[in-house]
Image: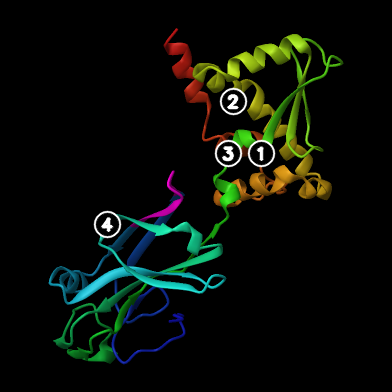
Amino acid sequence: MKLTHRMRYPHPVLSESSSDYVDCGFQCSFVQNMTADSELKITSDLHVTCDDLVELISSQKANIGYFIICRRSYYNKLQETALGLSEKYFEAGQLYGTVLIRPVLWTVKDIANFSSRSFDREFGALVDIPKGSIIGLGPEFRFSVDKKKYKPFESIFELAKDDGIAPGAVEVDPDQDRITILAASDTYKSIADMRNVRAGRDILLNAVYMPAIMDVLARLQTNDRSLEAKRWYRIFKAKCDDLGIDPADQTLSPLNVAQRLLREPLPRAFAVVGTL
């Protein structure tokens, strides 16, 4: 079923684009993650601010849920869920590219003489709603399923020796298949040793990887399109897309973007120091 806000119904439908209900709302949010078993976990948070519609759900006369649609793979499923927070799992192999989520409320029984103080007056005092009718329509949500974005961030980096670099310093070369961090032999060894220790990795995120990401972002913001051909770019761009970030946006701070991409790494460094 293709649902749009241009559709019209003979009964009131709660949606952001209609005035069928007065002073009521259908608030929806979704978070998606890939599990270790390669399943797509979708966490929904759905709220209806209309007591009469909530009563229909509570009395099992109506259900709440969402359509999950992937036109590229011809996947179209109506997923029943619950008010508030709810987690559902989907086989990720059936989804690829753009995925649409459309929250809905629908009747599961014929409802005669339904009334609500929130109706617009044009519907009168009582309405009959057949079983299987849409009675609430939430906003459309979009996200992309690209397995690249679920790869570990460190998979796009490589550490390499370059004795032309000053001791204790690093340089970044993004023109390779991986973003290459160059360091002199002694510095290289120290970084490599720290990567093998959990506490060391948390420190390196702040001291090495965050500056490296900032360096890459600064170059992307100069409209250097050559980097888009590098193998690391697809993973980097997918992770940016997941956060709604355009890495080439010159109005964004490379520091702020790097911190978001690394999930705010500074508190992890603080935690390491606190254990010493």
Task: Determine the CA span between mark 4 and mark 2.
Answer: 36 Å
Q: Of tags 1 and 2, which is closer to the observer?
A: 2
Q: Residues within 10 Å of mark 4 (few under 14, many from 20)?
A: some
Q: Residue at x 56, y 34 (%)?
A: 262
133 sits left or right of 261 in the view? left
Q: Which residue is mark 1?
A: 253
Q: Quadrant of the N terminus?
A: bottom left
Q: Quadrant of the C terminus?
A: top left
Closest to the observer, 65 or 148: 148
The range drawn in magenta is 34-44
Closest to the observer, 234 or 261: 234
104 sits left or right of 220 in the view? left
**Residue 205: which disc?**
2
Kindly indicate whether the residue at mark 4 contacts the one at mark 3 (C-beta within 8 angstroms). Answer: no
User: Which residue type does callout 4 highlight?
Assistant: Gly
Task: Determine the CA span between mark 1 and mark 4.
Answer: 35 Å
Closest to the observer, 98 or 58: 98
Q: Name the outermost residue toward the right.
A: 164
User: Which residue type does callout 1 highlight?
Assistant: Ser
Q: Is residue 117 above or below residue 264?
A: below
Q: Which residue is mark 3?
A: 261
Q: Which residue is mark 4?
A: 84
Kindly indicate whether the residue at mark 2 contacts the one at mark 4 (C-beta within 8 angstroms). Answer: no
Compare marks 4 and 2 and give the one earlier in the sequence. Answer: 4
Compare marks 3 and 1 and give the one earlier in the sequence. Answer: 1
Quadrant of the rendered image containing residue 196: top right
Secondary structure state at the residue bearing disc 4: strand
- Is residue 100 at least partly visible in the picture? yes
